[in-house]
Image (cartoon, rainbow, N blue to C red):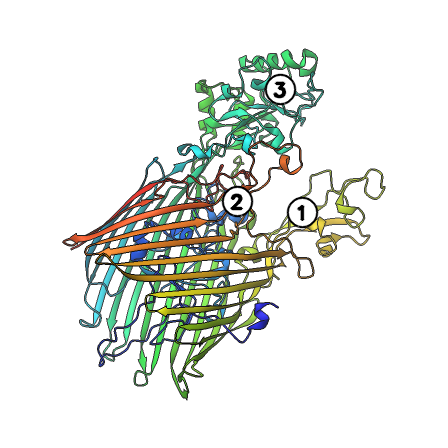
Amino acid sequence: MKLTKLIQALTLAGLSTHAFAQDNPPQSDTTDPDAKIERIEVTGSSIKRHNMEGALPLTVISKSDIDSAGITNVDQLMLNLNIGANSNDNLASNAGIVGGEERGNNGASSANLRGQGRDSTLVLLNGRRVATHGIQGRAVDLNSIPFEAIERVEVLRDGASAVYGTDAIGGVINFILKKNYDGLQASTFIDHTQDGGGNIYRLNMLGGTGDLYEDGYNLMASLSYSKAEILRGTDRDFTNTFQPERGLSPDTRGTPFASINNRPGSIDNLIGTGLVDPETGLSQTVMNVLALPGQAGCAAGGDGMDVDTGALWNRSNEIFSCAWDYPRASVLQQPVENLNLVSRGSFMLENGDEAFVEVVGSHVTSNKVFEPNQITPWAIGVEGFYPSTGESYDFIANALADHYGEEQINRGAPIAYRWRCVDCGPREIETTTKAYRLLAGLEGMLFDDKWDYKLGVSYASSEAESELGRGYHFTGLLAEGLGSGDINPFLLAGQSQSSAGMAALDRASAEGTILFGGKTTMLQVDGLISGSSGWELAGGEVMVAAGFDFRREGYEFQGDRRAADNRPTIYGAPFDDANALDDVSRNIKALFVEALIPVTYDFEVNLAVRHDRYDGFGGTTNPKVSVKYDLTEDLMLRAAYSTGFRVPSFNQLYNGVSELPYTGLDFADPALCPGGQVNPDDPNCSEPLQPSMLFGGKEDLGPEESDQANIGLVWSPVDSATFTVDYWEINKEGTIQTLSFDELIDNFELFEDNFIRDSSGNLLTIDRRWVNAGERKTSGVEVNAMFNGELYDGRWGLSFNGSYLIEDRKRILPNAEFGDNLVGTHSRGNIPLRWKHTVSFNWSRGDWTHNLIQMFRDSYLDEVPPGIASGNTRPANWNPVVTSYTTYNYSVTYKGLDQLELTFGIKNLFDRDPPFTAHQNDFSPGAAFDPRVADPRGRAFTLLAKYTF
C-alpha cells in the first residue's frame, strides 16, 4: 500500500544534514540562566521555537562549509547537493539550447530538487520570494543570488505549499544573507584549472557599522564581482566525438569542406542528384568528394573532419560521407560575469522592535557560444546554390565524374550542399540580466513577548535581454554571397576565403540584433504572527501562527525589436516573436495558519493549511500534517503528509497560438489507419494528409497538483553520533506538458479530442498546445550519518549523506499505463541516478583545519544510437552502461595570521575525467561526457583569502 495512504495523518519532520552541512540551525545561547531565550524561525515553518532539533527535514549549509568545499558559485552548490537533479539547469548543461521552452536558459541557472523541475522548486531569499528570470519567467535565476553575502543555505527536503504556496513541490531553497555586520572585510577567491580554460574569479567587499542590539542600528553593504571564463570543447581531450568503436560519432554531414546533397528543389537539375554507386548499386543521399576513392580523405577538409560513421545513425548507404566534430566545437562552460550588491539598514525601535530596509541587486552577463551554423541552399533560398563555374566547381565535378561516371553527374548544374561555415565564426548570444529586490520590514514581539510578528513590503524585478553576437548572418545576403561564388564552401585545410568572400560575410553579419527580451515583476505584502495559544497540554504549550500573503506578479516578453516592415530574415536565429506578450499580470491572495501541538512530552503534531486564490484560477487549499515521536531517548520517528500545487507560467497560459502545416507525406488519419501510417493497399489510407497543427498557450490550463509523504527514523546513541534514514514519495497529477506528434498518434484513443474535424469528419487540425495530461510518481530514500571526536590533540568530524532513488515513472494520462521505471537510464532532460553520496572528513587543530570530501555519482544506462538499436551495427567496444563517477576534493584553512584567513584547495584531486557516454549531442548536452553528472573542468586549484581590517 502506498505510503500516502498509510500516513496521511502522519508526517516526517526532522533536521538532518548534508555531508558539508552544520549539525543544527543557529541556536540561541542559553548558557546564561537569566538571558532571554531567542525563538528561531527555520525554513518550512511559520512558528518560532526555542528548540528546532528534529522538527524539519532540513539541510543547513554554512558559508564556511561552502568555502571549505571549494564551491565557487551557486551552480557548483547545486551540483554538490545529492537531492539536486542531474538536469539541464546549470550553465554547462544548457550551453547549446537557445529556443522554444528553453529560451530562458540563456544566461540562467536554476534549482531543481528531487527531479521535480526547476518550476517546482521554490527559491527564497531571506525567507521571501524574488522575481523569476526575465526571459522565460518560470524559475529564479540563481546567478542573481549574492553568493558572497550568504551566511547559510537552508534546503527543505519536503513539500511546503501549505506554508509558501505554489512551486514548493520538490522542496525549498532559502538563501540566508548576512546581517548586523560591524567591520570591514575584503576577500578574493581564485579557482584555476590545471589544464587551462574555465577559470573562475571572485572579489568581494563587505562593510558595516553599528551593532543593532548595543547601538540601536546597523548599516551594512556587500559588493561582489565574479567572472567565469569560457571552457571550450577543444580544451579537453575527452570531448573527442570520433570514437565509433565505442558507439559515438557526430551525426552531421555539414562539414567545413561542404558535402554534396541529393536534394532536388526549385532547381530540378543539380550536380550529384540521383547518384548511384557503381560498385554497390546504392543510391547516395549525402556524400563528400574528399571521401571518394583516390581523393585526399576527409581530414583534408580541415580541423574536426573525419570519416562519417553513418551506420551508427542507420545510414549504411552513405559510404563516402564525411562528418565534422561539432560537439567538440561547442562550449563546456559559458563565460559569465556577475556583479552583486546587498545593502541593509536595521534600526531598533524604542519598544525593542526592528525596522529594516534591504536592497539586493545583480547585473549578470553571459555569452552563450556554440558551433558555427550549418548552411544549406534549401534553407537560405535557391539564390544560395553554388554556381557552376570556377576552380572549386571544376574540382567537385571532376571528382564526381572520376567515380560515378560523367553520365551521372549533371555537369554544369548548380551544387546543393551542406556546409559548416567555420569562417562565419561560432554563434554567440549574449544575455544581460538586471535583477533587484527592494524590501522594507518590521519585526518584533507583542503581548508581553509571547507573540512574534513580522510585516514586509517588497518589490522585485528581473529584466533580461538576449543579443546576437558573431556567427549570425542575414539570410538574403548570405545566399547572395554564396550564389555569386564570392563565399566558397569548398576550401581545403589551410585555404582561406578570398577578400571578396570575407567582405560578403561581413556585409551579411547580423551582430548586435536584439533577439528577444523579457521582464518579470513582483509586488509582495506579507504578514505573520506566531506565539502561544494559551492552551496547555501534557507536552507543553500549543503554539500557533497565522499570516497573509498578497502578491501581484507581472510578465512581459518582447521579440524582434526591429520595425515590423524592416525585418530581413537572420539565418538560424531563434526568434520567438509569436509569443510576445505586452504586459500580463495576476493577483494572488493567500491566508495560512499553523499549529504546533505537543500532545505529550514524546509526541508532537504540527498542522498547517494555506488557501491561495489566483486571478483566473479560483482557489486552492493545501494542508500539511507532520508528527515526531520519541520512541526512546535515542530514537525518534518522524513522518509527514502534504499536498502541493504549481500554477501554469505566463508563457504556458498566454503564448501566442500559431498554426503551421504538417509538411510530411507519411501521415494518414489515425481514426482510420493504424498508427497513422499511409498504406497504398487501403483506400482510406492511401493518400497522405497534411493537417495544420496548433501550438502555443492555453488559457484554460489548470495547476499541477501533488501529494507527498515521507517517514523516517533519527537515532543518536551517543552525543558524538547521529544516524537518519528517510523514505519519501511524491505523486504529481495534471502535469503540464506538450505532447509530441508521435505521442498523439500512438495514443489516439486517449487524445481523440485533439484531432479537430469539420462537420463531415475530415481531419483539419491537430491541437498540440499545452495540456494538463500527465501523472508522475517518484520515491526514494535518504540516509545521513555524523560522527565526531578527538584525534591527536585535535577535533575530527565525519559525515555521510546518500540519496537512493527507487522509482521515477510517468504516464501521459491518468487512465493510461505507467511507463517503465526511468531510474538509472539516460534522459534528454533529467538523468535520474539510482545512487549519489558524499562523504566528508575534517580535522582541526590549532589554526589549521583540513577537509577531505568524496563525491560519488552512480552509473546509468546510456542512450542507444539508432544503428545499434536497430541491430544494424554493434561497435566492438560499445558499453551500454555509463560508468560511475567518483571525485575527491581537499582543502586546508589557516587562521594563524593576524586578520588574514587563507584556504587552499584542490578540486578533483586525482584529475578524474568524466565517464564516457555515447549519447547524441543534438538532444543532450556534452560531447563524450555529460555535464549534468560530471564537471568538465578537471583538476582545479582554489585559493580563498579573507582580510579583516
Residue 556 seen in render: yes
What label does residue 414 carry, if any?
3
| 229 displayed left or right of 656 | left
What label does residue 99 carry, if any?
2
Mark 1 is surrounded, within 10 Å at the Cα level, by few (under 14), some (14 to 19) or many (20 or more) other residues, namely few
Amino acid at circle 3: Pro
Mark 3 is surrounded, within 10 Å at the Cα level, by few (under 14), some (14 to 19) or many (20 or more) other residues, namely many
Report the Cα–Cα distance between label 1 and label 2: 19 Å
351 or 3, nearer to the observer? 3
Kindly identify which residue carries mark 1. 741
Q: Position of residue 581 (x, y in %)?
A: 52, 54
Name the N-terminal-most of marks 1 and 2.
2
Amino acid at circle 2: Gly
| 335 displayed left or right of 671 | left
Give the mark toward the camera: 1 or 2: 1
Amino acid at circle 1: Phe
Q: Is residue 374 above or below residue 904?
A: above
Q: Is residue 677 above or below residue 804?
A: above
- Name the element at disc 1: helix
Q: For residue 498, what is the image quadrant? A: top left
Name the N-terminal-most of marks 2 and 3.
2
Q: Position of residue 252 (x, y in %)?
A: 56, 31
Q: Are marks 1 and 2 in contact (CB under 8 Å)?
A: no
Q: Position of residue 122 (x, y in %)?
A: 45, 61
Going 45% across and 67% down the picture, which residue do you hit?
A: 551
Q: Is residue 230 above or below residue 537?
A: above
Report the Cα–Cα distance between label 2 and label 3: 33 Å
